[in-house]
Image (cartoon, rainbow, N blue to C red):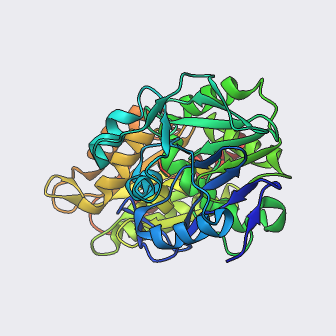
């Protein structure tokens, strides 16, 4: 097995998951995902985060390729979520003397998941641990992505083991480090990960970045995705932009349509957006595209137009998950519009309005509700004008 060095004494021992179809059993993984783990070999040996448990055999093989018969002294748990902590019990069984390191909030959930642990070490925010040549420092970053989350800073080489922060979807296809990869290739997967995993806690992300600002960082080693050693500003810039409501010029139109009439409305709206001069227009059918992809593009672009047919006086069912996620995640600083078909009695547009208004987005025009198919000239103009108004508002931003 190859050894992959971050430094002479620090090794990448993570795994690639290309078999899981749905991350957290609800988000598609067309390009897989990596569960990153790192070994620091010094007078004491520290393992920074285990991996998802079904990869234990491969994980152990990689650890032993680096360590041989040496033991692991410390297992740092930056995050309790099972995509990382899943192998904790297996590691403890393999290395019974290992001390498991977490903060005051780590062990409640961890032992609830995996049962009692014998050798626990609770570290305080900012506390250090000397391994020999390397000293680790622990910083809590609550809610990035769970309440117990922390990051581990290796002071000697100035490496931040950043947990979920600065991570992304996408297995590591040979390229482990940012300067080995085409970053454009990973950006969509990074943003989809951000938008659906930590976007909900964007304000906590900002706090974490501010907290770590005084710390000199030469390398970021997250728990998913590329290790950053050459393009730290590239990833920082994106995280700050995504966390503070920065948007690209473009419009996402997401619709739910039973018989194609609401879909046709989306096309008319899109034409208005295009004639306002907006070039990036994404149209999604919520019954066809898994919602994490739509959320990711809504996070990216300034304009968001949501439409659905009515269904039993409410909204087309497949639209409800997107609306729920938008209410929970609250992408910031959007221009939005609402449209839809009445079916026999309406209700879909009213439902969408009720939820979409909660996000305090800019709304340049009232919603458009259409009876039947959008063939009457009056309806065509209302829909086109909605698109034009959204497009112009996006351009003016
Ligand atoms: Fe990658 Fe929040 O776990």
Between 375 and 118, the one lying in front of the other is 118
Quarter of the rendering occupied by the C terminus: top right
Q: What residue is at 84 percent from the left and 62 percent from the top?
A: 179
Q: Is residue 280 visible?
A: no
> Image quarter for residue 33?
bottom right
Vertically, is 361 above or below 6? above
- Give x and y (percent) for residue 379: 40, 59
Between 249 and 122, the one lying in front of the other is 122
Vertically, is 389 above or below 266? above
Q: What residue is at 64 percent from the left and 61 percent from the top?
A: 188
Vertically, is 234 above or below 1? above
Between 366 and 305, the one lying in front of the other is 305
Total numbered circles: 0
Q: What residue is at 43 percent from the left and 35 percent from the top?
A: 120
Between 241 and 48, the one lying in front of the other is 48
Q: What residue is at 50 percent from the left and 68 percent from the top?
A: 267
Q: Identify the residue at the far left of this view.
A: 312
């Amino acid at each position: 097995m190859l050894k992959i060095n971050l430094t002479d004494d620090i090794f990448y021992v993570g795994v690639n998951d290309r078999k899981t179809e749905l991350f957290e059993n609800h988000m598609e993984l067309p390009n897989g995902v990596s569960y990153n783990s790192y070994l620091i070999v010094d007078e004491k040996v520290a393992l920074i985060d285990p991996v998802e448990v079904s990869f234990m055999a491969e994980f152990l093989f990689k650890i032993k390729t680096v360590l041989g018969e040496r033991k692991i002294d410390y297992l740092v748990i930056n995050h309790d979520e099972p995509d990382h902590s899943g192998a904790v019990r297996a590691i403890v069984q393999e290395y019974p003397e290992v001390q498991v390191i977490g903060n005051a909030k780590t062990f409640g959930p961890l032992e609830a998941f995996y049962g009692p642990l014998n050798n626990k070490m609770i570290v305080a925010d900012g506390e250090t641990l000397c391994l020999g040549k390397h000293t680790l420092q622990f910083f809590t970053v609550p809610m990035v992505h769970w309440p117990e989350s922390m990051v581990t800073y290796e002071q000697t080489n100035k490496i931040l083991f950043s947990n979920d922060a600065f991570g992304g979807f996408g297995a590591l296809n040979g390229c482990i480090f940012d300067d080995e990869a085409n970053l454009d290739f990973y950006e969509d997967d990074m943003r989809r990960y951000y938008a659906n995993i930590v976007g909900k806690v964007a304000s906590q992300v900002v706090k974490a970045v501010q907290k770590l600002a005084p710390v000199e960082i030469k390398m970021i080693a997250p728990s998913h995705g590329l290790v950053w050693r050459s393009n730290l500003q590239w990833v920082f810039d994106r995280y700050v932009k995504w966390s503070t409501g920065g948007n690209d010029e473009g419009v996402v139109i997401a619709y739910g349509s039973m018989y194609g009439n609401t879909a046709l409305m989306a096309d008319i709206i899109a034409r208005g957006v295009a004639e306002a001069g907006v070039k990036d227009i994404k149209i999604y059918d919520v019954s066809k595209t898994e919602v994490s992809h739509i959320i990711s593009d809504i996070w990216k672009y300034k304009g968001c137009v949501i439409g659905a047919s009515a269904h039993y006086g409410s909204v087309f069912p497949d639209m409800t998950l997107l609306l729920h996620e938008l209410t929970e995640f609250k992408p910031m600083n959007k221009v939005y519009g609402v449209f839809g078909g009445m079916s026999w009695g309406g209700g879909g547009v009213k439902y969408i309005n009720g939820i979409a208004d909660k996000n305090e987005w800019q709304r340049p025009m009232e919603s458009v509700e259409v009876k039947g198919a959008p063939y009457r000239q009056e309806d065509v103009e209302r829909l086109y004008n909605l698109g034009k108004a959204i497009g112009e508002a996006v351009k003016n931003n």
